[in-house]
Amino acid sequence: MINFNALKTRAAAAKPIVAQLEDSKRVPDFSIVQDGLLFDYSKTTIDRDSRDLLLGLLETAGVAAKRDAMFGGTAINETEGRAVLHTALRNLNAGPIVVDGEDIMPSILETLAAMEAFAADVRTGAYQGQGGTITDVINIGIGGSDLGPVMAVRALSPYHDGPRCHFVSNIDPGDVAEVLKNCDPTRTLVIVASKTFTTIETMTNARTVREWMAKSVSDPAAQFAAISSDLDKTAEFGIAAERVFGFGNYVGGRYSVWGPIGLSVMLAVGAAHFRDFLAGGAAMDQHFRDAPWQENLPAMLALVGLWHSHACDYATRAVLPYDNRLGRLPAYFQQLEMESNGKGVSMDGAPLPFHSGAVVWGEPGTNGQHAFYQLIHQGTRVIPCEFMIAARAHEPDLQYQQELLIANCLAQSKALMEGRGMDVARKIAASKGFTGDECERQASHRVFQGNRPSVTLAYEMMTPFVLGQIIALYEHRVFVEGVVLGINSFDQWGVELGKELATGLEPVVTGRQSTDGQDASTTALVDFLRGKGA
Ligand code: F6P
């Protein structure tokens, strides 16, 4: 059984980061370079002894055996009786993977080839809408059927040479309305992306878009494609089998961008770049399987995460990409990490004896610096930060701006670590003309505690390969944290209750049913909203 007490004791007594960095071997020893990615965790309070304790967690929890079981196709998602094989979607060169006695690779490769053929037809104009070549693609999906593609299309915009891509996810009518405003129905391809093909937001939006298209297009279904693991339901919706791309139930929604759910990414950047993205993920898989734990990037990122969440008791962590095109990455990681590791019981059903996964949030730098960093620097809660930064921009003419971006990123982790003591703050206040008690008061507002931890992930440039590496890195990090915590990272029962209640409330909100039996607060809210237009 995992016990974090020894780690908590070490964390409470840990030497400040600045002092730890006096060890000349610390930086090489507390960083990993893998396939062009540098992971630096030297700006944390972890020392060699605490790292040994952390590494011991991997042995106690049996992470190696669980990892091999995952890659081997064992049904490690025990509450749903499913294998966890999103890794198979990027396993293009590494041979068979057998699930329930059947090699799943031929069907994965066949679907990839079908996606590539379709994407090529759309991109070259061989496949047309009623009004001609496709200019716009609307991906309708939510959660994993949206966040992966939306994040990747934006991240890879320097490679985008296909049709414009739009994303509709929210049931909020404003979401779909804003997208439709900018599309010509006769030259738009609609992708309905839903693993289950039952999600109310997605299916409602799909019907709305079909009605919008039917006003201008004689056969709207001909401009629809579907991505799902329920092929009966896609047929019921009227989408021809040749434009339906399926995937197995061994791929969880939040892990699905590597397969057909990534179709909009492929349409945007082309099949070759999509394959580079898969290759980046596959390279990280190989590293995760082969590298000894101390040199293993996902394992060490997970252990740093556990140190902060379970030894230091920091409740949240911030993902701070210094790359504006990674603007949706924090939201993507939020789903990946919080849907996976936000669980209340261990695999055997017993209440967790410690907290589950950390709260994940963030925004790109430098924008965040002018918004919420104040609390990270001087607030009373410690928020470990995960910085990401490229050496090179996609705009060689603007490399100086990239260098300013780098300077800002490095300045933040340095400021968090070093802080500013009262002596310096006093001098600053005095230089502004403050004296006596007022100088003390002014100085105290200018003190930064420092010793605030961060890690930095650095790479040459944000390419499809690097994006693949980083996404797979975080997937495996979440896996390792989940195994150590003893939870099932691959189900998501926590979102079901809200879905059920929304379905039950729909007739009440639309007025087909009375509010009888609802709680007093919900009744009052329904009455107010119905009185105002619902
Ligand atoms: O919110 C729960 C969830 O099941 C996510 O895990 C998933 O990514 C999302 O809903 C969408 O589901 P589907 O792809 O089946 O429409």
Image (cartoon, rainbow, N blue to C red):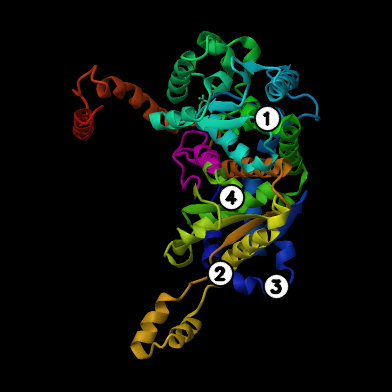
Which of the image's four quarters has the C terminus?
top left
Q: Which of the two labelled residues, at mark 1 and mark 2, occupies the earlier sequence position?
A: 1
Q: Is 352 covered by the magenta stretch?
A: yes
Question: Could you give the CA–CA distance between mark 3 and mark 4, rounded to whole angstroms?
Answer: 35 Å
Asked if disc 3 and disc 1 are in contact, CB closer than 8 Å, the reply is no
Q: Mark 2 or mark 4: which is in front?
A: 4
Which secondary structure, mark 1? helix
Q: Which residues are magenta?
A: 332-359
Depth check: give the residue in front, 338 or 272: 272
- Residue 23's disc number: 3
- Helix, strand or loop under label 4: helix
Q: Which mark is residue 324?
A: 4
Q: Residues at badges 3 and 4 in contact (C-beta under 8 Å)?
A: no
Q: Which residue in the protein does label 2 denote? A: 415
Residue in front for this viewpoint, 361 or 324: 324
Q: Residues within 10 Å of mark 1 (few under 14, many from 20)?
A: many
Q: Earlier in the sequence, mark 2 or mark 4?
A: 4
Disc 4 to disc 1, how far (Cα)? 21 Å
